[in-house]
Image (tube, helix red, strand yellow):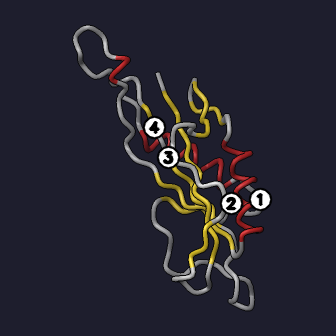
């Protein structure tokens, strides 16, 4: 059986190796207070990773109709956050470069072409300090 925690650990390790953001990578839960610049007016860029169990591929089942537990369709999301749109885009570009075609076992992590895509940073002004965020969808099909 494919372990989604092992896949998430690989993804987190790669993100944590990034020089400008690596210390601020969160798995599922972002703390209420995130690091800011010395003035406290701007947040430092960070990445939140959201991953689940994945699902099976019904089209890959054999004639028994049973689920093949050695195959997993895994679709994690990374949400890149920065103090403004420019910083968010820069951090998102760094994340995309690090994760696109990332080897995971015998397969590679790819941008999810079928997922809903946000093409520009969105602004969250409900928090202080305000921030821009950009979700990036990924897909990995194991076997």
Q: Residue at x 30, y 10 (%)?
A: 62
Task: State the image coordinates of residue 67 (x, y, percent, origin top left).
Answer: 28, 22
Q: Is residue 55 left or right of residue 106?
A: left
Q: Which of 67 and 126 lies nearest the eye of the viewer?
A: 126
Image side of residue 64 versus residue 73, left or right: left
Q: Earlier in the sequence, mark 1 or mark 4?
A: 1
Q: Are marks 1 and 4 in contact (CB under 8 Å)?
A: no
Do callouts 2 and 1 mark residues in contact (Cβ within 8 Å)?
yes
Cα gap from disc 4 to disc 2, whole angstroms: 23 Å
Residue 125 horizontal/vertical position (percent): 57, 81
Q: Nearer the viewer, mark 1 or mark 4?
A: 4
Q: Residue shown at 46%/21% (left/top)?
A: 143
Residue 6 appears at what percent x and percent y?
Answer: 47, 41
Q: Residues within 10 Å of mark 4 (few under 14, many from 20)?
A: many
Query: According to the image, label 1 marks what residue?
Result: 19
The residue beneath circle 4 is 74
- Whichever of callouts 1 and 3 sits on the residue coming sooner in the sequence is 1
Residue 120 % position (x, y): 67, 60
Q: Residue at x 74, y 53 (%)?
A: 93
- Give the Cα distance between marks 1 and 3: 22 Å
Circle nearer the N terminus (2, 3)? 2
111 to 37, vertically: above or below: above
Which numbered mark, 4 or 2, is in the foreground of this view?
4
* Label ID, residue 22: 2
The residue lying furthest to the bottom in this view is 39
- Nearer to me, 98 or 14: 98
Q: Indicate which label's residue lies in the foreground, 2 or 3.
A: 3
Q: CA distance from mark 4 to mark 3?
A: 6 Å
């Amino acid at each position: 059986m494919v372990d989604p925690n092992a896949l998430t650990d690989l993804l987190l390790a790669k993100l944590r190796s990034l020089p400008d953001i690596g210390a601020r990578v969160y798995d599922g839960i972002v703390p209420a207070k995130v690091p800011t610049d010395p003035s406290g007016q701007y947040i430092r860029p960070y990445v939140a990773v959201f991953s689940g169990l994945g699902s099976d591929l019904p089209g890959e089942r054999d004639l028994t109709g049973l689920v093949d537990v050695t195959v997993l369709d895994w679709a994690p999301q990374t949400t890149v956050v920065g103090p403004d749109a420019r910083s968010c885009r820069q951090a998102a570009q760094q994340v995309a470069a690090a994760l696109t075609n990332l080897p995971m076992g015998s397969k590679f992590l790819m941008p999810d072409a079928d997922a809903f895509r946000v093409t520009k940073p969105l602004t969250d002004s409900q928090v202080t300090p305000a921030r821009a965020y950009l979700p990036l969808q990924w897909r990995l099909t194991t076997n």
